[in-house]
């Protein structure tokens, strides 16, 4: 039995599945993993991504932040791939309880998923740091350096920056689902980003599966480890 067939068998045996995903879920949609080493950061940016994507840097150097943000994190042409589509189908058919994602691209919702716990927020939401007015992406005023609210305040994306805490309500909802699921599929993440990666310790179910191209710290605890592209694996599943 091949590994995809093994995954299919575990899915068939499970009635309450939670999916925990990272950047590798969206790379097949054309969204880059900004933590990968591609040489562009050193050539084009004066600071490393972890510095640019920090709370203090955003407030102190908003124009430099938005230069990186527009180039690397906003991908308006990206579309859901086979993984996003299959997960939405699994939810519609009552097999998938929720998606817990470290991604900020909104592709799970675009594919039709309804219960999505966005640990790091979303580029699909924005707000003013001064008056808290909310802006959808299409409502953000045009800008050359950085967007400003009608009150004059800085408009920022509703994403969790380095140096900021995760949203308590989102974390609590994710923990609840992890504690009560009977299967957890971890995909497209090396489980190296904390505190998000630490949430998987709340899983107490029967089956734990990892689909990731590289080794993770949880591999030894899994029922099944698949080293293939996430979209390819999920495209072969039937629910």
Image (tube, grey):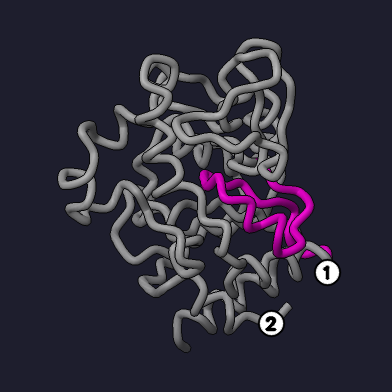
Which residue sits furthest right?
93
Q: Is residue 103 above or below residue 8?
A: above
Q: Is residue 206 above or below residue 80?
A: above
Q: Which residue is mark 2?
A: 238
Per the model, the C-alpha gap separating discs 2 and 1 is 11 Å
Badge 1: how crowded within 10 Å, few (<14), some, or many (20+)?
Answer: few
Badge 2: how crowded within 10 Å, few (<14), some, or many (20+)?
Answer: few
Q: Foreground: 53 or 170?
A: 53
- Residue beneath the point at 61% across and 67% down: 80
Report the span colored magenta: 94-117
Q: Foreground: 216 or 130?
A: 130
Residue 5: percent from the left, percent from the top? Answer: 54, 84
Which residue sits furthest bottom?
1
Q: Total number of numbered labels?
A: 2
Q: Secondary structure at mark 2?
A: loop
Which residue sits furthest top?
130
Task: Let me know if residue 145 appears in the view.
Answer: yes
- 55 magenta-colored: no
Q: Earlier in the sequence, mark 2 or mark 1?
A: 1
Q: Foreground: 181 or 114?
A: 114
Q: Which residue is mark 1?
A: 93
Residue 2: percent from the left, percent from the top? Answer: 45, 86
Residue 92: percent from the left, percent from the top? Answer: 83, 65
- Residue beneath the point at 34% across and 55% down: 220
Q: Which mark is residue 81?
A: none
């Amino acid at each position: 039995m091949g590994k995809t067939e093994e995954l299919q068998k575990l899915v068939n045996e499970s009635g309450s599945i939670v999916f925990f995903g990272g950047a590798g879920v969206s790379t097949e949609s054309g969204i880059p993993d900004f933590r990968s080493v591609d040489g562009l950061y050193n050539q084009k940016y004066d600071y490393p991504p972890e510095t640019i994507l920090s709370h203090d840097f955003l407030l102190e150097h908003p124009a430099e932040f938005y230069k990186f943000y527009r180039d690397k994190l906003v991908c308006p042409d990206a579309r859901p791939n086979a993984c996003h589509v299959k997960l939405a189908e699994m939810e519609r058919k009552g097999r998938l309880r929720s998606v817990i994602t470290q991604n900020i691209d909104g592709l799970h919702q675009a594919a039709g998923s309804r219960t999505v716990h966005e640990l790091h927020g979303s580029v699909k939401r924005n707000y003013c740091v001064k008056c808290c007015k909310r802006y959808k992406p299409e409502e953000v005023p045009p800008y050359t350096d950085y967007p400003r609210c009608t009150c004059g305040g800085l408009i920022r994306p509703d994403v969790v920056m380095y140096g900021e805490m995760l949203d308590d309500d989102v974390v609590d909802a994710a923990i609840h689902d992890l504690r009560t699921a009977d299967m957890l599929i971890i995909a497209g993440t090396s489980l190296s980003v904390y505190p998000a990666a630490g949430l998987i310790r709340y899983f107490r179910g029967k089956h734990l599966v990892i689909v990731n191209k590289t080794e993770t710290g949880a591999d030894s605890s899994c029922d099944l480890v698949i080293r293939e592209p996430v979209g390819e694996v999920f495209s072969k599943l039937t629910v």
